[in-house]
Image (tube, rainbow, N blue to C red):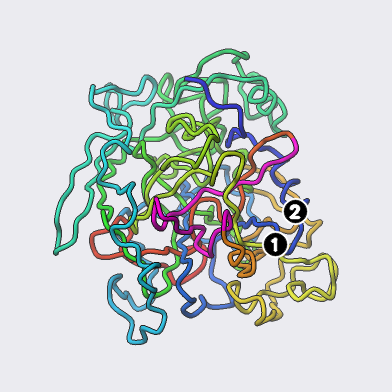
Amino acid sequence: MKIIGYFLAGFLAWTVVAEVAAQPSPNSGRNNDQRSVREIPVRGPVTRGTQNNTDSDNTETSDTEISDTSSTESGDDSAETLDETTNNSIENNTEIGEEPEDSSDTPTDSENSEGNAQDSADSESTWVLNSSGERAPFIYESSSNEQVLVNVQSVESVSLNGREYSHISATGIPNYQIEITQEILDSLLNRPKAYSDFLSGSPIIQVGDVIRFGEDIGYRSNSSCGSDAGYGFWPPGPVCPENVAHEGFIPNSPQAATEDCEAGLGVQGYWVNGTSIYQWSDGQSVNNTWHTLAPFAEVYDVDICGGHAANGDYHHHFYSSCLAELVGDDGNGHSPVYGYTADGYAIYGPWEDTGVLAQSSWAIRDYDNPNSASGCGETGARTCLLVDEYDIDQGVVSTNSSGPSTDGSYSSLSGNEFTTSAGFFYEDYYWDASLTARGGAYLDQYNGHSDSERGYHYHLTVSEDSNGKLIPAFPFTFGPRFYGKLDAQTIVNRCSTTVGQ
């Protein structure tokens, strides 16, 4: 299987951050994410048209927040939680599914697309089922000499409390096969810390090699990856993936939510091969206020398929060409389904039509213009926060927890340095309702929209550079809030009430 010649998610390198800086502030259509308690509380209900939920990466350390730029050992993803059924950060422990007293934001019939989507999670043809008992060649069961089963083991329709669900059973281990291109090899050789990231100072692969998931390409991997069991496939820091026994329920007939529901850390749904969908956050922040985005801050911490593990759970935060190859998405026509979020709505790939990318309606704040409504009155300064990232007209408020300037720097957990240009942090973004109002390929605040064939659905979002390379665009997968309703059975059954947690 050949990986299509678009952007290979694991190797954006510095060009990703440079691309962010080059985007026009008001209409970039990109966003970043971070994690930690914000000075500005989560906003009140927003007119139903988009709703998001966020997530981030776990590491080997405890689930604590980084209050300043961290020099902790690379790959410390503990900030991400892996509870597949509960997000414990919900305010007042309110259960999902309870109806709010004020239902003024109840969606219209056209927005409540229960049963409207043809690509429901109960369709076995959507999932990559392992019907032959195939096992991963390089990943083993914990404390066992037996290799892990790959992809999805079963999809079963069940009825619980009067609602129909798909019960997904998977190991979380994909079966990717990647042909090494010159672009992939160059991105490995050009890593800023290649001399220490690789045991011999460079990768041990050549153009034309076909690499299986977990095969040694020369990285100095985390010690959790045993010899001949994943070691060498992941850069230093991230732990080795394990069979984390994904067992989750996804609604077959999703319903639009009637209250705002922030996405959180950890598993937010499943890709079609049974691996985990994580949101924008990597669980880190600067001064507990400026939250970093996983697709940018972790660009050197993912494999050549753009994924890595946290607490053993392998996941993707953003578009992966390996997933694109798996589902046969070559950019001809509307993208197929890549996965399903906990609310039951499908995530399609980045293409709205042949040659037409779905467009994020999240824009980057203009810090460089002192007179900008989204800036802080001083060129390049991050000394203010938006009152409401869903309503730019509410203006900004000063903060004592200032962030790095737009020509400042951030040191990731893996010790890589990044310029903090506009678009590096979650707080750099706002939803531009005027973009959503254009319709067509433009998405709503939840990174989704409706059409007559698919009903409501999310899109992976990317931008395309002059060379045709696909660059992740905020909010990357879905969100930052869920559009759909969660309940006690869904993979995530509690909302997060704090951005980035």
Q: Where, by quadrant of the figure, is residue 286 drawn?
A: bottom right
How crowded pointer 1 is (Cα within 10 Å; few <14, some 14-19, many 20+) is rated as many
What number of labels is visible?
2
Question: Which segment is the magenta one?
Answer: 440-466
Left or right: where 209 falls relative to 115: right
Q: Return the residue at label 2.
A: 23
Rendered residue at 47%/25% (across/down): 231
Q: Is residue 438 magenta?
A: no
How crowded pointer 2 is (Cα within 10 Å; few <14, some 14-19, many 20+) is rated as some
Task: Tell me where residue 384 appears, x and y as whole percent.
Answer: 71, 75
Q: Between 434 and 244, which is closer to the camera in this rendering? A: 434
Q: Return the residue at label 1.
A: 364
The amino acid marked with disc number 1 is Ile
Q: Secondary structure at mark 2?
A: loop
The amino acid marked with disc number 2 is Gln
Above or below residue 419? Residue 153 is: above
Left or right: where 452 falls relative to 209: left
Q: Between 397 and 162, which is closer to the camera in this rendering? A: 162
Task: Tell me where residue 156 appears, x and y as whole percent.
Answer: 18, 43
Query: Is residue 99 at least partly visible in the picture?
Result: yes
Q: Earlier in the sequence, mark 2 or mark 1?
A: 2
